Amino acid sequence: MSATTTSGGAAVGAASGGERFFLEREKVLGPLMLLPAVIYIVALVGFPLVLAVLYAFTNVTVGDPRIDGTGDFVGLDNFRAVLNDNVFRKALRNTIGFTVISQIIVIILANILSLVLAADFKGKRLVRFLILLPWTTPIALGVLGWFWLLDSVYSPIDYALRRLDLLGPQTPLGPARNMYWLGETELARFAVLLVHIWRTLPLATVILLAGLTSIPQDIKDAANVDGAGFWRQLFYIRLPLLLPIMAVASLFSIVFTFTDLTVSLVLTRGGPVNDTQVLATWAYFKGIQGGSLAQGAAIALFLLPVLIAIAIAMLRLARRAGAD
Amino acid sequence: MAVVETRKLSKRFSDEVMAVDAIDLRSTDGEFLVLLGPSGCGKTTLLRMIGGLEPPTSGEILIGDRLVNHLPPRARQIAMVFQSYALYPHMTVYNNIAFPLKAQKVDKAALKLKVDWAALILGIDGLLDRKPRQLSGGQRQRVALARALVREPNVFLLDEPLSNLDAQRRASARDELQQFQRDIGTTTIYVTHDQIEAMGMGDRIVVIEQGRIRQIGTPREIYEEPADTYVATFVGSPPMNLIPDGGDLVGFRPESFFPLDDDGRSSGDDLVRFTLTDAREEYLGSEKLVYGEVNGVKAVARMATNAPLSVRDGGSAPFGVHKQDLRIFDRESGLRRQLARAAQVEPAPVSGAPGR
Amino acid sequence: MRTPKLQRSDLSTSALSRRSVLKGAGAAGLAGYLGTRAGAGAATLVQSTPTVNIQGTSLSILQWQHFVPSFDTWFEQFLNEWGQANGVTIQLDRINTADIAATFAAEIAAGQGHDIVEHIASLPQYEEAVLDMTDLVAEATNRHGEQLEMCRNNSFNPTTNTFYGFTHGYAADPANYRKSLWEQVDLPDGPTTFDELLAGGTRIFQEQGVQMGIGMSQEIDSNMAAQAMIWAFGGSVQDENENVTINSPETIAAVEYMKSLFEGCMTPEVFGWNAASNNQLLVAGQASYILNSISAYRTAQEQQPDTANDIFFSPPLVGPGGQDLALAHGHAVFTSMIPTYAQNQDTAREFLLHLVANYEAASENSKLYNFPAFPDTVPDLFTEGGWLENDPAGSEPPDKLMPLSAANDWTVNLGWPGPANALIGEAFNTFVLSDMMAKAARGDVTPQEAVAEAEQTLNGIAEKWRTEGLIGGGQ
């Protein structure tokens, strides 16, 4: 160091010494490590979001997506048009309905399933693996599988029902030879719900399972010694202790379900008569396929308040978890 | 109140090792019985089997002379305090204490009376509305005790309940806990690896090693009349000195090992003389330890700080032990040679004595 | 890119293995074929000479995956031969038709992408992002004679006086019926009128247990069926001036008819279909009558020869509007667009001209799926003793495709009698017509209410595009 100072001058010496540890300084390293995340968020989340909001107030179309000037802004016209549209109202109702109903069912089933999986039995690992499979399957592929299961002619479910004499002429579900799962409103809605449940249940189960196994053995032992039976332990110990992690699982699933495009798009294309149309599919049909980019953006923006509320809820949960 | 008894109680986990190996044990009514041993010796497993949290591989458990092997924990009339206290984190102190009563479907008024009573006894009546995370370690421990107490069990099972407290707090908690047990007079089985807790609190101590009982006795018996070299060296700090002598090991406590005057003035018939070589002194405030070697084996002496001793570091000095303080062990088996005689003299039970 | 996602009607199944089998078989048949016609496996019939220097340029094409796989095999070779002959670097990307619109939208937003985008329908809503093809249409007309009016209208916006696409061919949309079923209700050549369709279809359903397959789902075939029915009953969605005219007694009559048809001979499956479903039903032998191109039949020829032998074709049905209004859309209208951002616009134009010049090969290799927009380019198709009378891809009887011989007359553009505009484009993509039919057929609302609701929706859409200046009318 002193040699450097004498030969190259004080400035050089200080610089080289500083450079050596430059990257280790927290003020330098911190922002540097954060940079990729910031770039990612700005470029892939922030920019599209801002664009979507802007689009919703303009008259852009797929053929002319440029905002050329203030003349392109049309105020609330898109929202008025969207709100006046019966299909939009249906899509909004369906989106909320599918999300709420499927997630209530998912939470109940995930609790039961995780309790079962937490128990000791032979082949536990295999069963856990199988249950997780739907989650690891690409969603489009999974839904396509369901699409065939629910096919109007070839449905294996219908085949099974026919073999069991439940479907077909002179049977409880007959006289038709098929259920027409995707053709009848109630059945189509049921099918969409079913696929959402099928898809989000594994994650919720695994999260809850992790929560269950993180409950200290001592607490379970204490409850045993204290004389609590299965139900008392379930409702007074396990479920309350699982509540925070259940909220996390729920919020994840809600986001997935609420914003989902694939299930309705592949399974029903929103049919019959838009009875399974959701905001994401309707924004796609209207904005991309139909060309009304601005209205599509306006439709998609209705997802935003719910997602913001969920984001806030998640942050709160995270903060509370950090405080403990 | 009840007597806890185990008969040839064994536990083998999936591996071949016996965690608990054919243990025979019988408490007296209202006794404070300490299970002492190093970690992994099987003492906690033994306790959990008594509590019904772990099914035994073989053997019998009796509480109040009733076979309880097939009873679930809640039917065994026991209460347990865990090392972590296992308080229910989402419940207030009040609800934690009330939980066992609610499980028993005690009516609301009686429940409140009992909770208040338990809280009062343990001095936590001001904390009933708090959540466990708002309590100190000592307060949590007392909540756990209160929760055990309200059930008015026949037996308390305590699993290292003081190990999560800091050293200062632990000393006073020891005293409180012992006092508490004396007051309520419930048979208590207490697991610890801490010999000070065991010595200070236990009516009797059960020394366990590798799943087997090494010795059962009062703290004084355990300390003064160890049944074998294991007990002799496990209990006491620093442990008993063991000097080989032919086929024997001659054992004596550090505090019985004292320096002799240079002129050998303090000689006598009852004195056995040793030369401590390579001596080194360690100052501990109220007392000091002198380390060195006797016949090539490490030995240590404990004495008051002001005890007269002039030995250079690394030097030699004459040391002695009174004959009555010597304990002779078989070098091969480690068993105490005069134990049989001592047992005749002392009324202390020797069941479960080592049978290696 | 070949994920079997949203299949259009012509793709009878989405099982990839079946497709590849088909493709292999098609290619093998093709090789022997061309050997007698052209020299040593060449895909090119005429090597057209570029009018501008395109040497050293490149050309990238985004194209829909053809429903007759042999076409894609041929096209690849054809494109490569042209590239080599003219020193043009070629890049061909094929994706599912259902993904074209979205991919194109993404490329427009990015301001870069392929030089040619080809879809099976006109995409009037993209007009502002593509080149005006007026010169190209004129040049092609100059070289090969008149373009079919239907094809012109399908890519022309009279309001802006712009060709937003270049339509080089189309697929006819006849009826496909199972002859054996209709023989038993004394209609061996299939129904010719809507009355016969209802009566015969109902009897077949009751007596033979086979339903009819005219969709009312949220997909394109259902839209086309609904539109054809409206025409036949004398109604229209818009007039020549692009005013919404759907709310008419004629349309209401068409909706009422559809309701009776559903009640008489269809099952609720028709509400939940995707575009491939009616094909599947036909190939499975479970449909008496569907409206579709010949691709389902071509698939059946490979997979279910017995079923294929029982499938016959007929022209659009005659309704209350009379013979002149027995019309159909082009089931697919092959429309190429050159985006404004395209780097090689001249090269793109030259290739499209070259494609038209070789349409005889295109038509043949599509197994007559592709009909030419410039009829003179495929003289063998409609002539006496030509391909329709003697199917080169093999049919039993060989003249099975003869009902398509007048297709140029009964096929009209999307949105007829108006132009194929953004109003109709968005209406199709948001399923206004098929939903109108479905709501009435299910009894959710009366036919009158369904039509009124559709009118309101269409007016909203039209208003928006009028503000954009892309459609006329509204006075």
Image: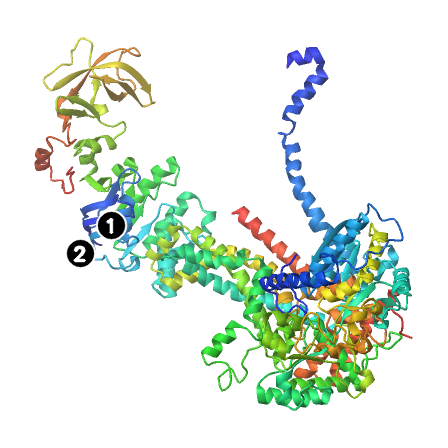
Q: Earlier in the sequence, mark 1 or mark 2?
A: 2
Mark 1 belongs to which amino acid? Gly
Residue B337 locus on image (x, y percent): 11, 30
A150 left or right, relative to A241 = right
Residue at the disc numbered 2: B65
The quarter in which the C terminus of chain B is drawn is top left
Can residue B124 be seen? yes
Closer to the camera, C40 or A119? C40
> Disc 1 or disc 2, which is closer to the eye?
2
Mark 2 belongs to which amino acid? Asp
Closer to the camera, C430 or C47? C47
Residue B133 locus on image (x, y percent): 47, 48
Residue at 64% across, 73% down: C279
Residue A308 locus on image (x, y percent): 66, 56
- Asked if B24 appears above or below C239 in the picture, the reply is above
* Quadrant in the rendering for residue C391: bottom right
* Quadrant in the rendering for residue C224: bottom right
The answer for how far apart the CA atoms under marks 1 and 2 are is 18 Å
B31 left or right, relative to C224 = left
Element assignment for label 1: loop
Element assignment for label 2: loop
Q: Tag 1: Cα neighbours inside 10 Å, few (<14), some, or many (≥20)?
A: some
Tell me the tag on residue C5.
none
Q: Tag 2: Cα neighbours inside 10 Å, few (<14), some, or many (≥20)?
A: few
Residue C115 locus on image (x, y percent): 80, 53
C159 left or right, relative to B140 = right
Residue at the disc numbered 1: B185
Using the image, name the chain to which the residue with label 1 belongs. B
Using the image, name the chain to which the residue with label 2 belongs. B
Closer to the camera, A192 or B263? A192
